[in-house]
Amino acid sequence: MELEMNNKNKRKLPTISGFLSFLIALIALAGVNIALLIDIDDFPELFLVQLPIVGFFLGLLGLITSKRSRLYALWGIGISLFLLIFTFLMIGISWVGINPKP
Amino acid sequence: MDKEQNQNDEELYQSFLTESMQDYEESHKVPEKGQKRLLKAGRNQALRTNIMISLAVLLLIVPVLTLSSYLYYAIGGKANHLIELASKTIYVTEPNMSLEEMELEEDIGFFTMDLYFDVFKRIGKEDYQAGKYSVGFALDQPNFPERDMKLERPLPVIGTMETDRLYHPDGTYENVDSDWDILDHLPDGTVGEIYLSLSQIMKPQELEKQLGDDVEVRWGAVDTGLEDKNLYEAEYVVAPIGFPLQIDTTTWSPFNGREKTNEEVFLDILKFLAKDEKTAEKISRAKSLALQKRIPYIEKHGVQIYGAVVTGPTTELRKLKGNDLIRVMKVGEVKLWNWK
């Protein structure tokens, strides 16, 4: 009868990857909020592309490992994906959808 | 024998059970200090999760609203339709006014859209900026546009047949005097824009022929059967509508003369505006456009004009004074010489 439930060393890294994914996604989301609210003209590539990609892959890493980090990883992946889709749609819409200028 | 064996087994089993329960208790018992630590860790973890999820939900509000606003205006070309509506309304309701479609800018907020564009007047041979328009839309409903006109003599904010300087020959107006006096006092080295009200309705080409090549007829006010009637007969408070008589070489102007004549484009625009008349009325200075009545009249009687906006050198404009065709002349804008 083996009731081995605890293995702290194994869990630490995956937990952190899920948590980091969520954290990075939140930072990117905050950056996008700031950019939208103060109406920055420049395209905030860091918040719209780079951070969400990092967050997405960290989330994937968190997902394939231990159970406890799954919630964070899912949120991280969700927000990162949303930001990537947001970027893609916004570029598409402002290019061809609204008042297109050749 | 069997009974004894059974009892033995049972005892053995019991002792095994107690032993392993003791083992378990001993090996997995968490000391009190550890329990507190675990509880604290659990609480912290829950708190962190709560904070992060709440933060995420809050931070999602602005991007989600922005994206849905853009989607709302993009799907079905709603924004483009409103832009087209606004620019075409200007062409047919503002005498001698055009706009640069390429320079038009839009700003989309949370389910609102603001349009910004400059309007131009051709005075002499050059286009001068006549002012700035900003039209706000809440969803697809327009607010009254804000106009910032840079004109010497702008038309009033609410246009009627009495105020827009173009008078129908059969209309009843009070105190309509010509501005020949102003024209007489202008120096010769200037160009001007004047509003001519004719003494009869006629074809636009006919008027251009009559006035000659020394002046340019920019915009013709079209007879739609309502201009000569008073409010009681017409049922609508209307203002002049018309169209540019010259071909606009700007690529994006509807009156570019490539496929259709200006008259055909004018009718097309009226039919286009009729589909969304309330919006067009808000953008125009007129209280009502009454397009359901005006379009059939124009289709029946053809495009005939009763007034026109003419530009040219002041000296040439003065020569129109004796012309029998002209009943009333009102002066619009005057600029320095640019007639080449």
Image: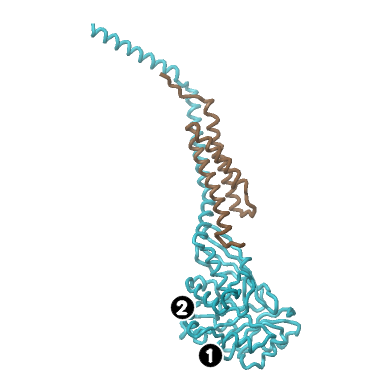
Chain colours: A brown, B cyan
Amino acid bearing label 2: Gln
Question: How many labels, in total?
Answer: 2
Q: Nearer the viewer, residue B215 or B27?
A: B215
Q: Position of residue B102 (x, y in %)?
A: 62, 66
Residue B292 badge: 2
The chain containing the residue under callout 1 comes to B
Q: Are marks 1 and 2 in contact (CB under 8 Å)?
A: no
Report whether mark 1 lies on the same chain as mark 2: yes
Q: Residues within 10 Å of mark 2 (few under 14, many from 20)?
A: few
Secondary structure of residue under mark 2? helix
Q: Residue at x 59, y 67 (%)?
A: B134
Q: Residue at x 67, y 80 (%)?
A: B333
The chain containing the residue under callout 2 comes to B
User: Who comes first in sequence, dot 1 or dot 2?
Assistant: 1
Q: For marks 1 and 2, give the CA distance.
A: 22 Å
Residue B148 visible at all: no
B199 above or below B156? below
Residue B170 badge: 1
Q: Position of residue A67 (x, y in %)?
A: 47, 32
**Extreme-top residue of the structure:** B1
Q: Nearer the viewer, residue B327 or B163?
A: B327
Quadrant location of residue B5?
A: top left
Secondary structure of residue under mark 1? loop
Q: Is residue B328 left or right of residue B139?
A: right
Q: Position of residue B340 (x, y in %)?
A: 74, 79
Q: Position of residue B65 (x, y in %)?
A: 51, 54
Indicate the quadrant containing the N terminus of chain B: top left, top right, bottom left or bottom right. Answer: top left
Q: Residues within 10 Å of mark 1 (few under 14, many from 20)?
A: few
Amino acid bearing label 1: Asp
**Extreme-front residue of the structure:** B259
Residue A77 visible at all: yes
Q: Nearer the viewer, mark 1 or mark 2?
A: 2
